[in-house]
Amino acid sequence: MNRKKEDTAAKKKIRAAGQILDWIYPRRCPVCDDILGKREQYICRNCAGKLKPAEEPRCRKCSRPIRSWTEEYCAECGKGRHVYEKGYTVYPYHGPIRESLMRFKYSGRQEYAGFYARAIAVYGRDEILRMRPELLVPVPIHRKKLQKRGYNQAEVLARRLAEETGLPVEHRLILRKKNTLPQKELSPEERRKNLREAFALRSPERRLPVRRVLLVDDIYTTGSTVDALAGLLKQAGAEEVYFVTVAAGGSPGL
């Protein structure tokens, strides 16, 4: 068998395997959670128009909506405390996307990551090109949460985003050593305190072979988690740290 025939045979096997997986674990719409049709790759036709990306004007640091075009930063980012360089988020964290991310995170809907990654790649294309990242790093979760949930939603998303961007993924770079309280229940200052010494480099002596790192997570709130990780990555030799998320909670500029 020549190379062309081998490639064709391999593609047929991959398609067949995908069809079997779709039959056992049918892909579902990230909005209504109904099973997708054969021609519906990421989202069903009825829900395609229900998710709208956050509108401009946006904060030039964290990407959340702000009040006026005359402003550059939201109230939080205007204080100039962040360690990271810049970030991009697609959706405001409310309505259908909030319910979708809850299922993605807690109900095993890992297949939603394909839609999220495509949305980040499409809507955030220009921003990501300007960031010029060399490596994707998913935000880690504690081993107890990993055992309970069965997967790290940020890693699942990062791997799908890697397929969209061609960038490599490094998921073992940082360890979450403290099983911290849920960030959504805390004030901004409590969030920062909660995350002190929560993360550590797995190999402190290891130096990163890249200069620009893109952190990947599902939700951005105050930036405390991103800042904690950005500090560690810069200790390891990164010069610039950026982030992308599916959604951003809160709108401090509104």
Image (cartoon, rainbow, N blue to C red):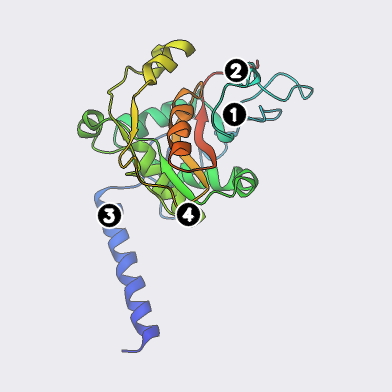
In 3D space, how far apart are the residues under numbered discs 4 and 1 (Cα atoms)? 22 Å
Q: At x 64% / y 24%, what residue is drawn?
A: 65
Compare residues 28 and 232 and report the one nearer the observer.
Answer: 232
- The residue carrying mark 1 is 62
Given contact means CB atoms under 8 Å apart, are the residues at marks 2 and 1 in contact?
Answer: yes
Residue 28, visible in the rendered structure:
no
- The residue carrying mark 2 is 76
Mark earlier in primary sequence (3, 2)? 3
- The residue carrying mark 4 is 167
Image position, residue 251 (x, y; %): 59, 18
In 3D space, how far apart are the residues under numbered discs 3 and 2 (Cα atoms)? 44 Å
Image position, residue 78 (x, y; %): 66, 19
Quarter where residue 3 is shown: bottom left
Image position, residue 173 (x, y; %): 35, 43
Mark earlier in primary sequence (4, 2)? 2
- Label 4 secondary element: loop
Left or right, 228 with respect to 132, comes to left
Q: Is residue 107 above or below residue 124?
A: above
Given contact means CB atoms under 8 Å apart, are the residues at marks 4 and 3 in contact?
Answer: no
